[in-house]
Amino acid sequence: FLFIPLLVFCNIFGNIDKLSQIPGLEGLKSLKEGSFLYDFITTQVPPILQSTLVGLLPVIFEYIAIAKEKMKLQSMVQRSVLDRGFGFQLVNIYFTLLGSSLASTIGLIVSQPECVFELLGASVPAVA
């Protein structure tokens, strides 16, 4: 659960409005939808950041197992890395699917709570 803020940070890069609120990036608001830079930032940058994060996780988990938990056996270190990696992948999948789906349909869910499953059923496949 330590990496959830990093996932949120990666997903923020897909939203030009949120990015333009960061000091120094106000100029992004002037990008036109459909331009190459707009499309690249909204569609390519978040997966690149998430892939980089996922690629660095085994190194980070191995460091934690050896330096912080003082594991000595390589088999125990690898088991720890795999266990943490599996847990992270599960959290990542559910967070990405449900977080993005809820964010895009939260207004409709609040106004029509009886249709929550239909609304999520329509928005989750779009995120996946």
Image (spheres, helix red, strand yellow):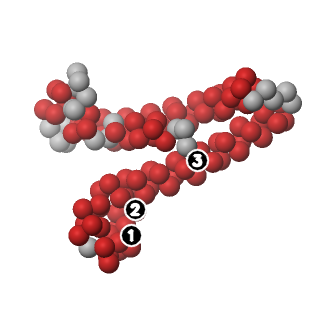
Q: Secondary structure at mark 1?
A: helix
Which mark is on residue 124?
2
Of marks 3 and 2, which one's residue comes earlier in the chain? 3
Instruction: Tell me which amino acid carries mark 1.
Output: Gly
Pinpoint residue 117: horizontal percent, then vertical percent. Answer: 38, 73
Residue denoted by label 1 = 121
Mark 1–mark 2 CB contact (< 8 Å): yes
Residue at position x 46%, y 36% from top?
6
Mark 3–mark 2 CB contact (< 8 Å): no
Q: Is residue 49 above or below residue 90?
A: above
Instruction: Tell me which amino acid carries mark 3.
Output: Gln
Q: Is residue 105 above or below residue 61?
A: below
Q: Secondary structure at mark 2?
A: helix
Instruction: Tell me which amino acid carries mark 2.
Output: Val
- Number of on-image labels: 3
Residue denoted by label 3 = 89
Residue at position x 58%, y 52% from top?
90
Give the position of the N terminus as an image quadrant: top right
Q: Is residue 88 left or right of residue 15?
A: right
Q: Hey, which residue is sitting farthest right in the picture?
A: 73
